[in-house]
Amino acid sequence: MSDKLEQIRKRIDTLDGRLVKLLLARARLAQQVGRLKEGAVYRPEREAQVLRRILRANRGPLTDGALARLFTEIMSACRALEDSMTVAYLGPQGTFSQEAVAKHFGGLTATVPCASIDEVFHQVETGAVGYGVVPVENSTEGAIGRTLDLLLSTPAKVCGEVVLPIRQCLMSRGRRLRGVRKVYSHSQSLAQCQQWLARRLPGAERVAVVSNAEAARLAARERGAAAIGPKTAAALYRLNLLARDIEDESQNTTRFLVLAAHEAPPSGNDKTSLIMSTRNVPGAMHDLLTPLAVNQVSMTRLESRPSRTGLWEYVFYVDVEGHQQDANVARALAELKQKASFLKNLGSYPAAVT
C-alpha cells in the first residue's frame, strides 16, 4: 500500500511541476496581450469565452463550479500582471456582494467596499473605480428597487452579470440557538429566511440593517444577538455558526450586474438590458413588445417600476437574449425606438457562466 501511495504522490509532484511551467507560460502570454491590446484590461467577453470553453472540456471529477473558480483565479492573476483595476461593491467585508465580486473577478482584484448601492454607482460614474457590482434581483424576493431606480439615470453601462447561489447562515457569539433573542440582517435576507425563523426562533426580534456584514458586526458586540448572512462573515467577525442553509428556498439565487464606463463586445452568448416606457393607452404594451416577437428576440425578464415622473406612470425593465450588434436584436431596437416614448439601452454583456 505504501509503495503504491508513494508512486501516486510522485506522479502528482510531476504534474504539479508541469502545471507551474504551463501557468508561467500562460502568464507571459497574458503580458504580451496586455502590451498589444488597447483599452480596458478586463475583457468580459473574452473571459466568458475562456470559461465556456473550459467547462465544455470538463470530464470530471472536478465540478464545473470548481473548475470555473480555478480558472477565474488564474485569469485574475494574469490580469494583475497587465494593469491594476478596482471593483466597488456593497460592503462592508463579509457581504454576498463581496462573494459575487470574488466569483466574477477573482481574489487578486482590488476592491472597495461601499456603504450603499448609491455609492457603488457614484464610484463608477466618477471614475474612482473601473467597475462596480450591484445586486439587481433575487429569485425569492424579486427585484432590488434601489438598483433599478439608479439604473434609470446612470451614465454607466452594464458589461457583465453574476449569478450567485445564496446560502444563508445564522451566526452568534453564543453557541446555543435557544439563547438567541434578536436577529440582525439585511431586509432581503430576513425575508428569505422568514419560514425558518418562524419555526426555530419564533420569539426572537428581527432587526433589519444595511447589510449582512453590518448585522454580523452588531451580533459580535451584543449578547443574545445573532446575524443572518454568508459564512464568510462568521469568520471575519469571529462568530459561531449556529445553523447553515436556513434560506426557505433551496434554489435561492441573487443576480448581480457589473457596471462600467464601457460596454462589452459580443461573446457568442449574450444579454441586452433595456429600460422603456410607452403611452398609457389600451394595447400600448403589446405594441411595445411586438418588435421583439417579430424579430425573434427572446425576452428573459420584464419588470415594471414607477417612473417617478407622474401618477400611475411606469417604466419597464427588460432583458433579452442576444447582443445589440446581432442583426435581429439591432432590428428590434431600431423598431423599439419608433414605438417607445422612452428607451434606454443599458448595454449588452456576456450571460453569466454558471
Image: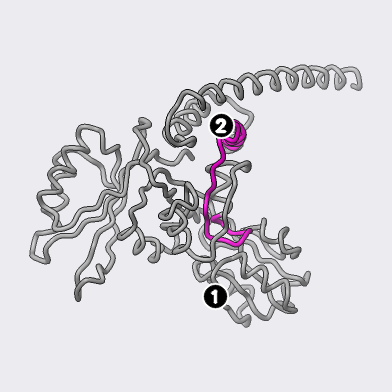
* Residue at screen point 63% across, 19% down: 25
Count the labels in the image.
2
What percent of the width, then of the height, locates residue 80?
Answer: 59, 35
Instruction: Locate residue 93: give its quadrant.
Output: bottom right
Residue 33, visible in the rendered structure:
yes
Q: What's drawn in magenta, residue-wise? A: 68-97
Compared with residue 311, is residue 192 higher up or lower down, i.e. above or below? above
Residue, disc 2: 82
**Sequence order check, earlier mark of 2 and 1:** 2
Name the foreground residue: 67 vs 159. 159
User: Where is residue 6 drawn, in percent x and y?
Assistant: 87, 20
State whether residue 64 appears in this view. Answer: no
What residue did someone put label 1 on? 208
Residue type marked 1: Ala
At 22% from the left and 40% from the top, the residue drawn is: 297
Answer with left or right where residue 283 lies relative to residue 296: left
Q: Is residue 89 left or right of residue 346?
A: right
The figure's colour scheme reads one colour
Callout 2: 10 Å neighbours few (<14), some, many (20+)? some
